[in-house]
Amino acid sequence: MATPQVFVVDLWVQAAWRGPYPVLDGYLSDLGNTACLPDACSARHALMNASFVCLGLLLGMGLPLVPASPRRVRTLVGLAALGWCLVGVAPENESMPLHLAGALPIFFCGNAGMILDGLHSWSHDRRRAVWSGFTGAVGSAATGLFLGGQFLGLGQGGMERLAVYAPALWAAGLGAASVLTRADTGRAAPLR
């Protein structure tokens, strides 16, 4: 349930940007860039990079808590979690090859894992299946649009966030559902 920390940190880091931050046109990784340019500076870059790593750790540590999650789902989302950690420790301006090596699984593996979780969950937990399928489909569609240069009025920054933040929303939703289920039944149970 703590994965939305990245959204709060994103906004906090944007607030310290030199000049107005171009949220619709700026890449998310720009907020973690450790170099200051005359017209662009992420004064809180260390916080943003720590938030990326934290998101990866939260996703990775939360995977064993997702009931009845098949190995391929855990593997795909786990690769996305490792990607977040790598993006945080290798900012775009310090090591673009490592940064891209972390970004690719975020775009592809996390969203694919959510779709697979939705398909797997359909027979035993319809709400989870719909949530997983929906967040995975939105993230996958946004990835395709982003990579194809189609931003639908959201700009490259908005479309990128829609693509890569989907697993954080997915994990928060599953965590909240698990807590609510435990509160209602006094024990962990799948949502129906």
Image (tube, grey):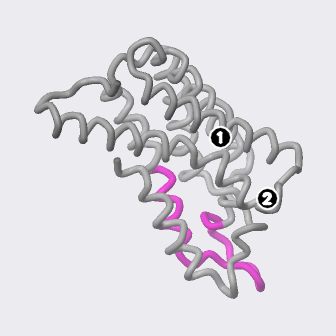
Give the farthest residue toward the left: 186
Instruction: Classify mark 2: helix, strand or loop.
Output: helix
9 on left or right of 177: right
Image position, residue 121 (x, y; %): 45, 18
Give the CA separation, mark 1 to mark 2. 14 Å
Q: Residue at x 54, y 66 (%)?
A: 10
Lower sequence index among marks 1 and 2: 1
In front of the other: label 1 or label 2?
1
As shown in the figure, which amino acid type bears the numbered disc 2?
A: Gln
Q: Which residue is mark 2?
A: 156
Q: Quadrant of residue 39?
A: bottom right
In percent of width and height, residue 17 lies at: 62, 81
Q: Residue at x 59, y 75 (%)?
A: 14
* Percent coordinates x, y for residue 53 in the rendering: 47, 50
Label 2 crowd bin: few (<14), some (14–19), many (20+), radius 10 Å:
many
Quarter in which the C terminus is drawn = top left
Q: Nearer the viewer, residue 182 or 57?
A: 182
x and y percentages locating residue 96 in the rendered image: 73, 50
Residue visible at 54% across and 51% down in the picture: 89
Q: Classify 131 as above or below 1.
A: above
Tell me what residue is drawn at x 44 percent, y 14 percent.
70
Seen in the picture, residue 84 relative to 156 is either above or below; the reply is above
From this view, report whether residue 118 is shown above or below residue 172.
above
| Residue type at the position of mark 1 | Gly
Membership of 40 in magenta stretch: yes
Q: Nearer the viewer, residue 13 or 145?
A: 145
In front here: 133 or 50? 133
What residue did someone put label 1 on? 139
Determine contact: label 1, label 2, CB under 8 Å.
Answer: no
Left or right of 154 in this view: 166: left
Magenta range: 31-53
Magenta highlight on residue 60: no
